[in-house]
Image: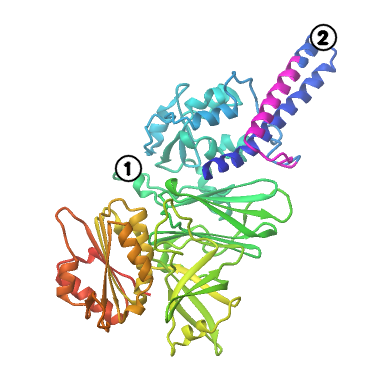
């Protein structure tokens, strides 16, 4: 699982750090032995044995957790050696209070915050109240943790940890623990965010862009000093990120602070020495953008923890060394703005296959570059761009899944490939070019983009879709989403308009889905049917929609429309006349 592998990586440095601390203690004991004091010698022997046993325990824990055996961090790095005059005062921990025991405790389900899973906003006055051994809160970079349960597990002892009780301990933490991934260690102890700026020192740090992050962790934005109306936590929607490294890899972890749909939300592009990570969160876009500190290999791995809203991007260093930062921030780095205001970004893709769907429609499968990973949210489109006769031609297309039928288990999100269902027009400049484009050719793909947000599906019980021709493409993934992930949807109905029966896209899959899913229905309407056609005939009209758009009691409805401009405009007019509000209508526009 993603969370388990992340924890393994996060504790690697801490286990190695503890081993080095034991070695430092042994060296001090050796110096004491040279004084010739017999009692000291006996004490040294006892300490060495104790240190050996503790190191052996950590080694076994490392083996159990599949921690890499290579020496990392490198000798003499900040992650191994504390600054002069700031050495750590380690104490002997009680049996059953090792790092591994702490990890087990955090995974046990025990409430370590005392808040039963709630996150609150903490004032400075409230923080000061929690300053005792059994009720100890502390603040690190604007985040408040209840560290009472960690007292007996802290290598520096209770007295050292109590120095941080009831105060902002960022400076204390940085003096000794600057490299430690406290977010991973204390994630189950998180109480919430400070309601005011934690310290004047942090304000000074924000004057420089790179200093607003420590090991990739974003500082909280300045908040108002006055009390803020409830609900306070709901106002903090801005994602943040952290980063960590091993000897050979760098990992960026983005905390989106919301659940991530099964389709994913991450768009990652590693091109030469630049890394671009974009999170598509509803109508908002969160962007991280660096020129990397050193040369890296050209592939990325992206893992998503959907339920907790966490995305991890991992890539490999070309040379095994220690990075002091991810890299130099580029324009618009660490910004959170509306998707419509974000500039389109293109990457070169390769056409790897073409599959006929109907007599004039194909599915083009495009392979992204090795350094790119694209999770296209449902309802979003991408842009195809190519140069024809010296002019860039651009057109939007909505990606589709490999199949309309939801699998028995959750499907893998898009990543390295894109599938675009494209109708070929004989006189179309771009589509006729695509029809003749040989496999292996390159195409520029920009985006994703689009105004559709899953928020409008919240609590929807009846989902209605009106599609004409290739206006079916956004509906394909919407149908799959409704049946696979949206438990509130009791009925999904598609009215699909085409000229002839041979024009119906994925006709057999639609029929199969109807037979398997009682929550799904499809009605086909043909404007130029053959005599043998037994379904609906004609074009969209009020009478047709009145029978189709049912509104049962205690229902919440959403009508989605997509097709040629004339069809879309008429369909929306007719739906409005049936007393559907603007909030109950969504138009997919390319």
> Which residue is under mark 1?
227
Closer to viewer: mark 1 or mark 2: 2
Q: CA distance from mark 1 to mark 2?
A: 64 Å
Q: Is residue 201 left or right of residue 315?
A: left
Helix, strand or loop at disc 2?
helix
> Which residue is under mark 2?
38
Residue 466 position within the rendered picture, expressed as x and y whole percent measured from the top left:
27, 71
Residue 355 position within the rendered picture, expressed as x and y whole percent measured from the top left:
49, 74
Instruction: Say if 60 sits above or below 7 in the image.
Output: above
Residue 355 magenta-highlighted? no
Instruction: Say if 427 sits above or below 164 in the image.
Output: below
Magenta span main SS: helix
1 and 2 marks in contact (CB < 8 Å): no
Which quarter of the image is occupied by the C terminus?
bottom left
Please rate how many residues cluster around mark 2, counting C-alpha atoms within 10 Å: few if below 14, some from 14 to 19, many from 20: few
Residue 259 position within the rendered picture, expressed as x and y whole percent measured from the top left:
40, 49
- Residue 182 vs residue 473, the one in the foreground: 473
Report the number of numbered marks. 2
Please rate how many residues cluster around mark 1, counting C-alpha atoms within 10 Å: few if below 14, some from 14 to 19, many from 20: few
> Which residue is located at x 66 percent, y 38 percent?
67
- Residue 535 vs residue 392, the one in the foreground: 535
Helix, strand or loop at disc 1?
loop
First reached walking from the N terminus: tag 1 or tag 2: 2
> Which residue is located at x 39 percent, y 49 percent?
236
Q: Which mark is residue 542?
A: none
Query: Is residue 412 shown to the viewer in this render?
Result: yes
Tell me where residue 7 sits by quadrant. top right
Residue 143 position within the rendered picture, expressed as x and y whole percent measured from the top left:
46, 40
Per the rendered image, the range of residues in magenta is 46-74
């Amino acid at each position: 699982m993603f969370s388990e592998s992340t924890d393994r990586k996060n504790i690697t440095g801490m286990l190695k750090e503890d081993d080095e601390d034991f070695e430092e203690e042994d060296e001090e004991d050796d110096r004491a032995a040279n004084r010739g004091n017999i009692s000291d010698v006996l004490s040294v022997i006892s300490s060495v044995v104790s240190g050996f046993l503790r190191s052996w325990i950590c080694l076994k824990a490392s083996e159990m957790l599949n921690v890499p055996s290579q020496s990392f961090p490198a000798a003499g790095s900040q992650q191994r050696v504390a600054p002069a005059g700031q050495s750590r005062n380690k104490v002997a921990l009680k049996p059953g209070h090792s790092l591994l025991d702490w990890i087990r405790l955090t995974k046990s389900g025990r409430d370590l915050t005392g808040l039963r899973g709630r996150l609150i906003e903490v004032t400075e006055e409230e923080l000061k109240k929690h300053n005792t051994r059994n009720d100890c809160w502390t603040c690190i970079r604007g985040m408040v943790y209840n560290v009472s349960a960690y007292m007996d597990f802290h290598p520096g002892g209770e007295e050292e940890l109590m120095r941080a009780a009831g105060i902002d301990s960022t400076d204390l933490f940085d003096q000794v623990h600057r490299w430690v991934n406290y977010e991973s260690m204390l994630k189950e102890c998180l109480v919430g965010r400070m309601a005011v700026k934690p310290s004047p020192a942090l304000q000074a740090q924000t004057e420089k862009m790179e200093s607003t992050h420590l090991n990739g962790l974003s500082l909280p934005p300045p908040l108002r000093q006055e009390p803020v109306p409830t609900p306070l936590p709901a106002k903090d929607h801005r994602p943040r990120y952290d980063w960590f490294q091993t000897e050979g890899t760098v990992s960026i972890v983005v905390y989106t602070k919301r659940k991530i749909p099964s389709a994913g939300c991450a768009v990652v592009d590693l091109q030469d020495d630049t890394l671009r990570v974009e999170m598509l969160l509803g109508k908002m876009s969160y962007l991280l953008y660096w020129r990397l500190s050193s040369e890296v290999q050209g592939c990325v791995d992206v893992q998503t923890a959907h339920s907790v809203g966490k995305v991890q991007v991992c890539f490999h260093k070309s040379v095994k060394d220690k990075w002091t930062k991810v890299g130099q921030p580029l324009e618009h780095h660490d910004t959170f703005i509306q998707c419509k205001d974000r500039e389109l970004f293109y990457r070169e893709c390769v056409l790897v296959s073409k599959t006929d769907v109907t007599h004039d429609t194909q599915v083009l499968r495009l392979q992204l570059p090795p350094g790119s990973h694209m999770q296209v949210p449902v309802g979003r489109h991408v842009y195809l761009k190519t140069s024809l006769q010296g002019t860039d031609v651009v057109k939007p297309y909505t990606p589709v899944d490999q199949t309309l039928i939801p699998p028995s288990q959750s499907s893998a999100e898009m990543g390295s490939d894109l599938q675009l269902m494209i109708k070929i027009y004989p006189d179309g400049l771009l589509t006729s070019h695509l029809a003749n484009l040989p496999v292996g050719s390159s195409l520029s793909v920009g985006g994703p983009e689009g105004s559709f947000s899953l928020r409008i599906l919240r609590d929807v019980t009846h989902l209605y879709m009106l599609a004409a021709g290739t206006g079916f493409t956004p509906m394909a993934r919407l149908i799959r989403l409704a049946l696979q992930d949206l438990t509130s949807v009791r009925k999904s109905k598609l009215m699909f308009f085409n000229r002839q029966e041979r024009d119906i896209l994925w006709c057999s899959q639609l029929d199969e889905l109807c037979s398997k899913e009682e929550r799904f229905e499809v009605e086909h309407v043909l404007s130029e049917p053959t005599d043998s056609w037994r379904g609906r005939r004609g074009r969209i009209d009020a009478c047709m929609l009145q029978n189709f758009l049912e509104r049962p009691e205690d229902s919440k409805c959403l009508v989605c429309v997509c097709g040629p401009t004339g069809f879309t405009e008429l369909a929306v007019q007719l739906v409005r006349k049936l007393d559907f509000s603007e909030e109950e209508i969504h138009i997919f526009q390319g």
